[in-house]
Image: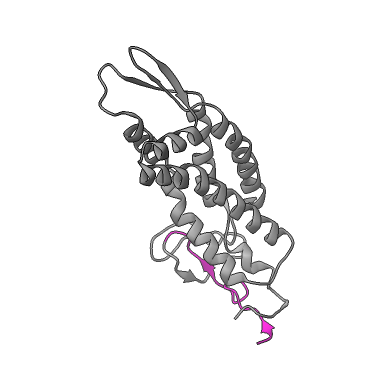
Amino acid sequence: MTGAARTGMREGFVSCEACGLLSRPVGAEEPGDCPRCGEELEFRRRDAIQRTWALVITAAICYLPANILPVMRTTTLTSEQTDTIISGVVRLHASGSWHLALILLIASVMIPLAKLAALAYLLISVQRGSVRNNRERTRLYRVMEGIGHWSMVDVFVATFAVGLVRLRPLLSVAPEPGVLFFSAVVILTIIAAQSFDPRLIWDSSRGKQVTNDG
């Protein structure tokens, strides 16, 4: 089906980012507050693309040392060993705790990388003015925003500690610099997802002919 895409802004509405209500703006410059929840309304987040790119690039820079530098040091009476995230995954798998190794791999390696790739794809498609697959891109953003919190630091620390600490006597566990970079990646990707305005996905369709988009 071919036709002009209909968006809330095109029809003279503004959506509340807190409760999702569509309402008529008070004015063209200042849309006012949401009549249902009182949240301040914005047609679009200011400088959303620039802020999101800055956060994504910074997170990508931190991602490399987060996976290369050691994140934890374990010390016993007879030995001392440091582990990166990947070496922790390998040790967990080698010890038979494959399910913990899988959780660590997904939560600490795959999810942050997937979020960075998804955000970069959304930003590039918006900047290129793509009018295809708007619904799919919006769903991608919602899924990414929903699963992103599974990469929180507490998931990583709990999984790593459970696998490495075997109730051995006089065992101490201390964080290493990699934890700081990993924490930065998690926090930056969460903020980047919140900074991106998914309504920008539909703006390229304003005044254009849309095909293959439902």
Quadrant in which residue 39 is drawn = bottom left
Q: Position of residue 78 (x, y in %)?
A: 36, 12
Q: Position of residue 17 (x, y in %)?
A: 48, 60
**Left or right position of 131 against 179:** right
**Residue 32 visible somewhere in the drawing:** no
Eyeballing the image, is 181 above or below 73? below
Q: Position of residue 66 (x, y in %)?
A: 54, 33
Residue furthest to the top in view is 77
**Residue 120 visible somewhere in the drawing:** yes
Eyeballing the image, is 194 above or below 181? below
Give yes or no for residue 199 being in the magenta stretch: no
Q: Residue at x 63, y 78 (%)?
A: 213
Query: The N terminus is located in which quarter?
Result: bottom right
Q: Nearer the viewer, residue 119 or 31?
A: 119
The stretch in magenta equals: 1-18
Q: Residue at x 58, y 31 (%)?
A: 65
Give yes or no for residue 15 being in the magenta stretch: yes
Q: Nearer the viewer, residue 199 or 130?
A: 130
**Left or right position of 108 against 126:** left
Q: Position of residue 56 (x, y in %)?
A: 61, 44
Query: The C terminus is located in which quarter?
Result: bottom right
Task: Report how many numbered discs are placed on residues in the image.
Answer: 0
**Left or right position of 59 against 90:** right
Eyeballing the image, is 117 above or below 5? above
Q: Nearer the viewer, residue 37 or 175?
A: 175
Q: Main secondary structure of the magenta part?
A: loop
Quadrant in which residue 63 is drawn = top right
- The chosen color scheme is one colour
Q: Residue at x 55, y 66 (%)?
A: 138
Q: Residue at x 38, y 61 (%)?
A: 37
